[in-house]
Structure formats: C-alpha cells, structure tokens
Image (cartoon, rainbow, N blue to C red):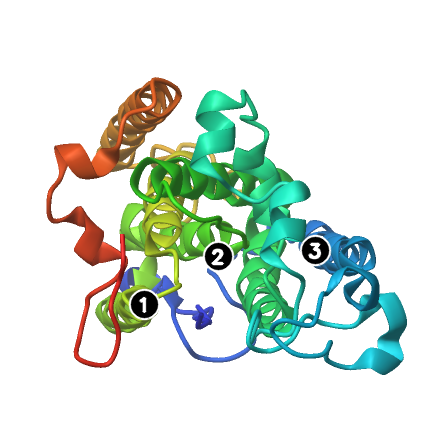
Amino acid sequence: MATVDQERGVGNGKNRGNSYYQSSSPYYVENDEKHWTSWLVPMFVVANVAFFVVVMYVNNCPKNNLGFEGRCVARFLGRLSFEPLKENPLFGPSADTLEKLGALKWEEIVHGNQGWRLITCIWLHAGVIHLLANMLSLVFIGIRLEQQFGFIRVGLIYLFSGLGGSILSALFIQSGISVGASGALFGLLGAMLSELLTNWTIYTNKAAALITLVIIIAINLAVGILPHVDNFAHIGGFLTGFLLGFVLLLRPQFGWVGRSNLPAGAPVKSKHKAYQYVFWVIAVVLLIAGFSVGLVMLFRGENGNEHCSWCHYLSCVPTSKWHCGN
C-alpha cells in the first residue's frame, strides 16, 4: 500500500482553486465548509487489532500445534504465540483458525450458506506483518478522507469496497482462503481517484496529482501478481471505491458554499457541474449491476475463470521463480 496527500491551495479570480501536495490540508476546503474530526478510521484500526488478538487467543499455538512444521514463534507470549514460520511466515495464526473464525472460502459461502464470510474476512489478518501494513495504510489514507468527507461516507466506501473485493475474490479464487482489509483500502484509493476526476474543475496542479495517484495505484496493483496475494480482492475493492467516489464524494463548485455572502443580484453558479451528475448516474447503474450480477453468479456457484480464461493472470503471473498452482 501507499499513500497520497492532496493539499489545499489558495488563489483569487480565475486562479482560485485547489492545489495538491502543498502544505497541510489534504483536500480543497472552502472557508464555510465543515471540517470533520476523524474517529471512525481510528476505531477501525482498534477493531482490526482487537480481532487479531482474539484470533491469536483462539489459535493457541502451544496447545494446538503438533510440531510438524517446527515450534511456535515467540513462545513467551503464551497462547498468543505465532505459528511456526514454515506454516505462516507473516507471524500469525494457522489457516484452520482463520477459516474457523470467518475467512473467505468459496465452498463455505456457496454450499455452506455462510455469506457472512464476505464481511468477516475483511476484519481478519494473516499475521502481524499483514496487519501492520494494512493499518498503516488505513491511517494515512483514511484519516485524511474522513476529515474532509465525514465518517458516514468514508465508512460506506470502506465497507462496500471490502464487500466488493470479497465478491470478486470468491468468484475467481475457489480454493484456499483469503483474509485482510486490502480490498477496503484499495476502495479508498479508488475513491480518491474518482474524487479528483469528478471535482476536476476546483483543483489546480491536477494533472500532476492524477499522474502521481495513478502511479501509486498501479504499483500497488502490480504487487498483487505475486503468489499468495489476492489481487482479485484488490481489484474488486478498487473498482467499488472508484464508483462510490463519484456517488458520495461530489464537491460543489467553488463559491457555492459562500454564496450567501454575495451581494444582492449577483449571479450564483449551480451547485454541481453537468458532468458530475452524469458520472453519478453512470456510477450508480454500474454499482447496482455489478453487485447484482456478482452476487447472483457467486451464490449459483459459478466460476469466474470459466467466463474469463485470462483473468487468473490478474492475481498471479507464473515465472521461473514461482508457480501459481490453481
């Protein structure tokens, strides 16, 4: 994961707008626009850490590890000690424990009527390294977004992006398990991109910001072609967040918030541009269609790879150094 700061700029007349990457404020904010205090994202971090502690407590390596893969790591932690590195190199629990506590598993969702796994897997992590990487990304990305757009919109983007990532992952990866908040985090990155696009006219230095953001997203998605990385969850989360950004993160044109201070008879701009409404409608239609089709295909037990013979390369590209299995 990587982070992006989108900074405020101040100008007058025709140059009035917003500039990315300048000083302290991550987004454009008119003087009269509300600035939120971030509390939901820190709560998400606390919840993820708490869930991980519970998972490790249930895992109880000293009692349940039979020693075939070696001894538990950090045995001084007692029942919170980690599985042998041969079994889990990320310093975490066993796959059996993760599966028992809600990891994403296609067979259980389709044939076991356990659709709740589409949500619970977002709150589980494979190990300390996995947890730290995701939580640091969540703090750097999520807090800035929540400060500018509020906890409701950011919370919806986070949760629905995680769900979208889980659905796409389950459609294409039907062996093994998958856990982690990466799909939700990619959703926040996608929302940052669509927020820039839909509010294009109020920013300055937008071309540089767009290029930087696209490069960061591309690098993170490229990492997903490594084995044991669920890039379908990343892609599904990113697409969901990207579309939700057009729906939830619209900003009014510059001057709209302070229109009450204009002299009598002064022309007032419309709140939004026409293209913003077009993006909004298209995004809503695609979101409804995407979730509907995805859920129907999933619970009918269909395999996404049968409809897209090359899509497996989006999650793992075999090389002379590793193979991708199924």
* Mark 1 residue type: Leu
Q: Which is nearer the eye, 41 or 7?
A: 41
Name the kind of residue labelled 3 in the image. Asn
Up/down of 112 relative to 70, above or below? above
Task: Please tell me which of labels 3 and 2 falls first in the chain.
Answer: 3
- How far from the left and from the top, in percent, is residue 113? 54, 20
Q: Which residue is mark 1?
A: 213
Residue 323, percent from left and from top: 24, 68
Name the element at disc 1: helix
Asked whether residue 5 appears in the rendered view, the answer is yes
Q: Which mark is residue 158?
A: none
The label on residue 48 is 3
Across and down, in percent, residue 156 comes to 55, 37
**Is disc 1 in contact with disc 3, using a CB cutoff of under 8 Å?**
no
- Marks 1/2: CA distance? 17 Å
Task: Tell me if residue 115 comes above or below residue 219 in the rendering.
Answer: above
Which residue is found at the position 24% from the left and 81% from the top?
321
> What's under tag 2, amino acid-wise?
Ser
- Percent x, y for residue 19? 38, 70
Crowding at dot 1, Cα within 10 Å, few <14 / some 14-19 / many 20+, comes out as: many
Q: Which residue is mark 2?
A: 182
